[in-house]
Amino acid sequence: MKQTTESPDLVRLIKRIVELWVTYIKGQLLMAVIIGAITWVVGSAIGLPGAFWLGLLAGILTTIPSLGPLLAAIPAAVVGLIEGSTVINVENWAFALIVAGVFVLIQQLSSLLIEPYIVGKRLDLPPLIVFIAVVVGAVVANVVGAYLAVPLLVTLREIARYLSAKARGEPPFPDTEPPDVEQPPQMPRA
């Protein structure tokens, strides 16, 4: 079988795409653990019945970018409305509002502080683009579309960058020197 000069670049492109998918999955799993734990601890502190299970649900739903935290707040607020607090002495409807507020606070903490460092910087995607991609993915393919929107977007971006560089006659991966370019000798560090 004849190997073309395109083959190493294509292999490198595929490896890059796989790395981005793995990065995305790792980031989502880490986010799920962090948000689940925060939700459990804060829910327990305010007396939310079933805080562990609601934290677990919040962690799982957090893996759906942008929409997940909203979906997680609904059952927690319903539990707050029906059961009330075991710690705070307020009426159930007021406690449901407190629970909803806590979930919004946790979601904002996640979106503004945690997620940009864990997922956003590694994938180099602006939050607005992520949000639009998730909404379009959800409209096109429901929950599966929402889950796959970000990694598919990153995949398309990498393919577009690769094809654009090839069309311009530039190296598709400018971050490294081609293997046939001799590197100058390095000076020893003192």
Image: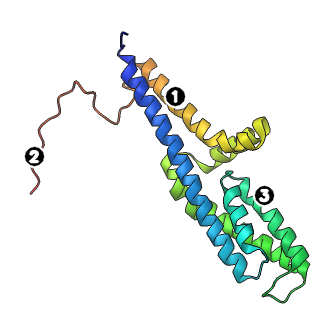
Say left or right for 159 vs 45.
Answer: left
Q: Which residue is mark 1?
A: 159
- Which residue occupies the foreground of this view, 177 or 152? 152
Expressed as whole percent of the image width and height from the top left, the position of residue 178 reads 28, 27
**Secondary structure at numbered mark 1:** helix
- Quadrant (top left, top right, bottom left, bottom right) of the C terminus: bottom left
The amino acid on which the numbered mark 3 sits, given as a three-letter code, is Leu
**Secondary structure at numbered mark 2:** loop
Q: Which residue is mark 2?
A: 187
Q: Which residue is mark 3?
A: 71
Classify mark 2: residues with Cα within 10 Å, few (<14), some (14-19) or many (20+). Answer: few
How many callouts does the rendering have? Answer: 3
Quarter residue 91 falls in: bottom right
The amino acid on which the numbered mark 1 sits, given as a three-letter code, is Ile
Residue drawn at (31%, 35%) of the image: 176
The amino acid on which the numbered mark 2 sits, given as a three-letter code, is Met
Quarter residue 83 falls in: bottom right
Expressed as whole percent of the image width and height from the top left, the position of residue 189 reads 11, 54
